[in-house]
Image: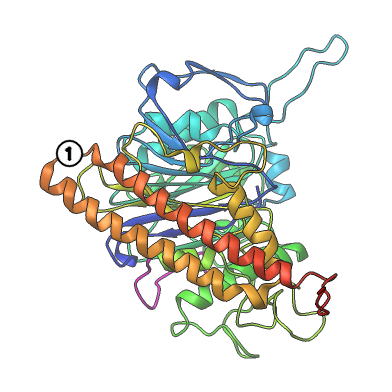
Amino acid sequence: MSCTTVLVGKRASNDNSTMISRTDDGHFDVKKTIVVGPKKQPKKYKSKISHLEIQLPDDPMRYTACPSVDPEHGIWAATGINAAGVGMSATETLTSNPLVLSADPLVEYQPAKGRKREVPGGIGEEDIVVLVLPYIHSAREGVERLASLIEEYGTYESNGIAFNDENEVWWMDTIGGHHWIATKIPEDRVVINPNQFSTDNFDLDDAFGKQESHMCSADLREFIRDNNLDCNQNGEFDPRKIFGSRRDMDHVYNTPRAWFIGRYLAPKSHSWDGPDAEFGLESDDIPWSLVPDRKVTVEDVQYLLSAHFQGTPYDPYGKHEIGLSGKYRPIGINRTGVTHITQIRNGMPAETRGLQWICYGCTTFSCWVPLYTSVPSIPDYLSKVTLDVSTENLFWASRLIGAMADKNYDHCIQNIERYQDAVNIRARRLIIEYDKKMAETGDYSLAAEANKKICEAAKEETTKTLGRILDTSSVRMKNNSKLADN
């Protein structure tokens, strides 16, 4: 999946929460948000893509997920929060290079041919949330479980995976078919990772010692040495220069997104514009993590994940010099299925700690709906999504709004911004109200009632906005005529 990831350490956020977030935008995948109870978790898992079968533990926890509505190509659960208050996002598709992929080839499915038997492939984005999230009690445990699976079964793609609990955020990069590294994000930092192997620092001594903030494959040093992978100079260890890519396509597709996010988060700490800029749109050394100039809110992350180079000559909706507008791949794009901000709130009771902010369709034009995750089910507006287009669910309503507003951007964007703010404000008020109610009464079953009211508010605002955007788009149809018919 071609995605964009933003991770926020607890001291980098305004409310001391950890956040992992990602756009899931490989294709026009119809998505829903559900709760998977222990009885619905399979005992034996079989991947659709790789045909791999894995026996699962007997003690799964409840967890949320954002699977594909059409099961033909697998579950693709994307993200979730489990009953232990651990969040997960899987996966950010990464780049690599021929040195790595020849030294440790990806484990790809081989169908039966003639007398040759079928050979299953490894695990991948289709599988990872289901295989890991129901069984972990901390972000670190998430890395450890996934690492054991990668080492045993391998993977058929290069991926980045994020985990968070109330105190820690961990990021894991797969390397080739069986290798990996994982980093605990410094609490005061934000990580930027757009479809590229971007991790630019790693403490091997810690990974092979106390493992306080770094973990890796047991043979990583030998793997690098024996295959002459180390392209660093002067004794530094930069994983991006060893395991990542450096292609012209990165400068069109990946690095510009990192530039826009970094420019927003740290406009004073670094220079991003002009001939003497520290970092440009095509720089290969844009920091993977940085300390933001101000504390980061959920709304900041929403803005970043819906960005389209606004305020620059590269905005596809801008009126700029020919050749610049639309030159680089924006963050908010048309083919997004679901985007999430998985927020674990520090100091909250376990039952209300996790909030999952869900956005369907193109983030540029869609609203975000926060949900308590310690619930038995998700309201129909987000969970009962069908393959048939219907305004009775948020997925299709969001897709319709986006398709119409895109064609009439200048005339619709003000209504879109008001819509997004209205849903955020009404939802946040309900979160404040129900946090207080549950703290006072100890009745955490009220979380389901809160979710119902949040979804009702989102549906009301979405229906009003759909009508306004439809009206604007209808008036601006090309076959209009100003001559009255009477």
User: Would you say residue 296 sits in the magenta stretch?
Assistant: yes
At which x and y percent is residue 225?
60, 47
Left or right: 24 with respect to 182? right
Check the picture and name the quadrant holding the C terminus.
Answer: bottom right
The residue where tag 1 is placed is 443
Q: How many marks?
A: 1
Q: Which residues are magenta?
A: 286-297
User: Would you say residue 381 sits in the magenta stretch?
Assistant: no
At which x and y percent is residue 246?
70, 62
The chief SS type of the magenta part is: loop
Q: Secondary structure at mark 1?
A: loop
At which x and y percent is residue 426?
36, 61
**Which residue is nearer to you in this view: 411 or 371?**
411
Is residue 284 in view from this perspective? Answer: no
Is residue 36 in view from this perspective? Answer: yes
Kind of residue at badge 1: Asp
In the picture as drawn, the residue positioned furthest to the front comes out as: 486
Residue located at (46% from left, 74% from top): 265
At which x and y percent is residue 449?
30, 42
